[in-house]
Amino acid sequence: MSRLVAPLTGPILVVSPHPDDEVLGAGGTIMWSTDAGAQATVLYVTDGSRSHERFLSPEKLAKIRRAEAAAASAALGAEPRFLDVPDQAVGDHIERIIRGVISELERTGATSMFTPEREDPHSDHAATTQAVLAAIARSGWSGTLLEYPLWYWNHWPAMPLPWPPGRDTLRLARGSLRSQFGLRTKKRFETTVEVDDLLERKRQALAFHRSQLEPLVDDAPHWPTLYQVGGGRWLESFFTGVERFAKTVR
């Protein structure tokens, strides 16, 4: 296990599949670095338009989530950029994302890049990093790649197994096997950043993603929120005071 003892000096490119992934996975590290003077850009891959389509139209959700992302980026000290790939369809737009990532690398001159871990079970997250790795290969980019875990944390013993057994129990069991019951953390995500002093600001940045935390319409008791995953334990896994990454220097 190695510790990142100094902030990234930048420029930094943060690739975020959905608005909110950037705060959850790397919010503290981004703020630590921008506070020290690094320039950071968050590239939002999807428009987030289908997260709550039972309650709001995709067009309205896309506008809401773009505004939320812009506010959250500002809280992180970063510039927001948008690819507007349709939500939940990243795998159908790999070439578009590759070109977008290369364009941002060239525009910003980024020497460090964040992306979700390549084995994330969420299809949009895994496809995003597939595109990032392809962009690196095509462009010949050299720098520090930091992969941040997201749905990796949704496993036992971090999460309780639902009882009586059902579909969610089976899903968590599969995640537990994939994570080797948490032991994979030390093997894969061996680079750590201490962010205790930034946790309150990280929570404030996440709060700008309001649509993911509370209902935006009246009489919507079934509006999905991040607090509902694992009874809130999954969300709290991002506020332990440590952010973890798989680090590759190219």
Image: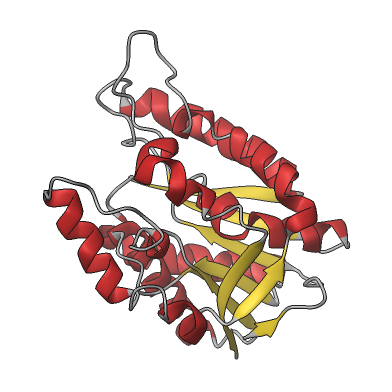
Answer above or below: position of 99 versus 90. below
Residue 30 at x, y = what percent? 71, 59
Between 217 and 92, the one lying in front of the other is 217
Q: Quadrant of the N terminus?
A: bottom right
Answer above or below: position of 41 versus 225. below
Residue 109 can be seen in this image: yes
* Image position of 164 (left or right of 8): left
* Residue at the far front in the pictured view: 164
Residue at 70% across, 77% down? 111
Residue 91 at x, y = what percent? 27, 62
Residue at 43% across, 69% down? 98
Residue 148 at x, y = what percent? 52, 68
* Image position of 191 (left or right of 66): right
Residue 178 at x, y = what percent? 29, 75
* Residue at the far top in the pictured view: 218
Q: Quadrant of the C terminus?
A: bottom right
Residue at 33% across, 25% down? 223
Q: How is the image coloured?
A: secondary structure
Residue 145, located in which quarter of the rendered image? bottom right
Between 20 and 42, the one lying in front of the other is 20
Answer above or below: position of 66 versus 119. above
Residue 109, located in which quarter of the rendered image? bottom right
Answer above or below: position of 127 versus 200. below
* Image position of 13 (left or right of 51): right
Between 41 and 126, the one lying in front of the other is 126
Residue 245, located in which quarter of the rendered image? bottom right
* Residue at the far right in the pictured view: 36
Residue 136 can be seen in this image: no
